[in-house]
Amino acid sequence: MLRVRGLTMRYADGKMAVADFDLSIEPGEVVVVLGSNGSGKTTLLRCIARMPSPTAGEIWLNDTNLAALSGERLRQARLSLALIWQHASLVRRRSVLSNIASGALGRYGGLWTALGGLPAVERRAAYDYLHAVGLVALAGQRAGTLSGGQAQRVAIARALAQRPQVLLADEPVASLDPEAADDIMRLLRHLATHEHLAVLCVLHQIELAYAYADRVVGIRDGRIAFDRPCAELSRDAVRQLYLSEAA
Amino acid sequence: MRCANSISARPLESRRRGAATRRAQLDRGDSLALQLVLVAIVVQAAIVVRARPQDLITGAYGMADIIRRATPPDFGKIDMVWWPALETIDLGIFGTLGGIIMALPLAILAAANVTPSRFLYYAARGVIGFARAVPDLVWALLFVTAVGLGPFPGALALSVHSIGMLGRLFAETIEHMDMAPIDALTLTGARRVQVFTHGVIPSILPSLLGIALYRLDENIRSSLVLGFVGAGGASASNCSRR
């Protein structure tokens, strides 16, 4: 489904953030990316979503190379690719329901949505997504009043409203307590298994990776360090990944 | 080893201390020069405006006399003043609304983080700067020439002049907002206009309303003097009565 070939991102100052990265994910699979701070994990995810565009490489989503698209065609291709951010990134002054329904905006082009309106059918669907993340009671609440865990769940519901094929999650549990982090990861696992989404998730918590991932990809200095099924990954290999970064 | 280190560190330390002392002396010199320049500016301003504080004391009786005659207000003349007063307030309302409608699109173009192109950014900044640089009385004179005497040219003048302040402050508000929700909406595949109406506007609405209310307050006060050039408001009826 999602295949990344030779993805490279070099910044204007010459710093190489991601170098010649290969990766593939299939529907129903959860792939976790591990690596220490500054190793290029977030840049990798952002480059896959083309924000920013990579310096080189190919990003194949089914039969479409996202790296070769621009303008309207890129916008349409992005509909299949949802990104969950580290800090939820909700519009704080809008209601939870409006934030979720706004995930579907890309499928509508009329004057009503251009003027700030939301399609009634999407508002109804937003309730279903809220139900899926267990927050129906908060539908009318302002997004700015939510706790970190609740906000992250709403961000996942917004991503579901987009009806994507691939879910990219950039440290979705970074600011959450262990229980909330577990809940979020269980939800992502559920979406991969039951909704057949391909989930690519950046994490720092090794235990969560072991608990919920099918495959773990290690990244060091922007390069792939290992890409192994979870069952074949030794804790020593993961420790080495972080130790070599510290050194 | 420790000995070698301490020997080589000593000249380095003294060089650092010397540089710090020189920098401190330079800072003191700069600060003194700056203070002298500031004093010179204030003194020349006082000379140019021929400031005579003692006149305020000798003229206190005149000011008190005006206040005495203005209070209590003479409500017997209310039928003569209510229409010009309403006209003055409405000039401010129309001018502010017109200003908002014209300033908002310009502010989007003039905000570095959302502008679609560098050329449009500078063009919008230029228009906003020009609208602000030309005083509202001059705009009123231009519009009186174009559409004739009355409150309408005054309202147009306030609208165009408001673009200057509203456009600048709206653009700065957009530039300082949190871009994460905007990027998140963009990545859902939302169109540019949808990102603006569903992300940018809700995020900055309270600030925009605050700026608009401040401008309304300013426009109502400005509309008081537009009558001097025949552009409506309370001063227009005052001038025509004289």
Image (cartoon, rainbow, N blue to C red):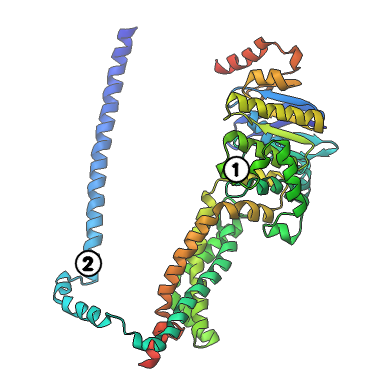
- Between B143 and A67, the one nearer to me in the picture: B143
Q: Residues within 10 Å of mark 1 (few under 14, many from 20)?
A: some
Going by the image, does B81 lie left or right of A7?
Answer: left
**Could you say where residue B69 lies in the image, as x and y percent from the top left?**
24, 83
**Residue at the spot 51% in from the left edge and 49% down from the top edge:** B176
Q: Quadrant of the N terminus of chain B?
A: top left
Depth check: give the residue in front, A245 or B35: A245
Instruction: Give the numbered dot on residue B46.
Output: 2
Q: Position of residue B148 (x, y in %)?
A: 52, 88
- Image coordinates of residue A234 in percent, x first then y, are 70, 10
Q: Residue at x 52, y 74 (%)?
A: B94
Determine the image quadrant of residue B55: bottom left
For the residues carrying marks 2 and 1, which lies nearer the camera in this image?
1
Between marks 2 and 1, how big is the CA–CA gap?
A: 50 Å
Residue found at x 58% / y 14%: A243
Quadrant for residue A209, please give it.
top right
Task: Name the foreground residue: A240 vs A29.
Answer: A29
In the picture shown, does residue B196 fall above or below A32?
below
**Residue A124, numbered label:** none
Residue type beneath disc 1: Ala
> Mark 1 falls on what kind of element?
helix
| On-image quarter of the C terminus of chain B | bottom left
Answer whether residue A55 is visible to the viewer in this image: no
Total labels drawn: 2
- Disc 2 on helix, strand or loop? helix
Residue A124 higher or lower than B56, as above or below: above
Is residue A147 shown to the viewer in this render?
yes
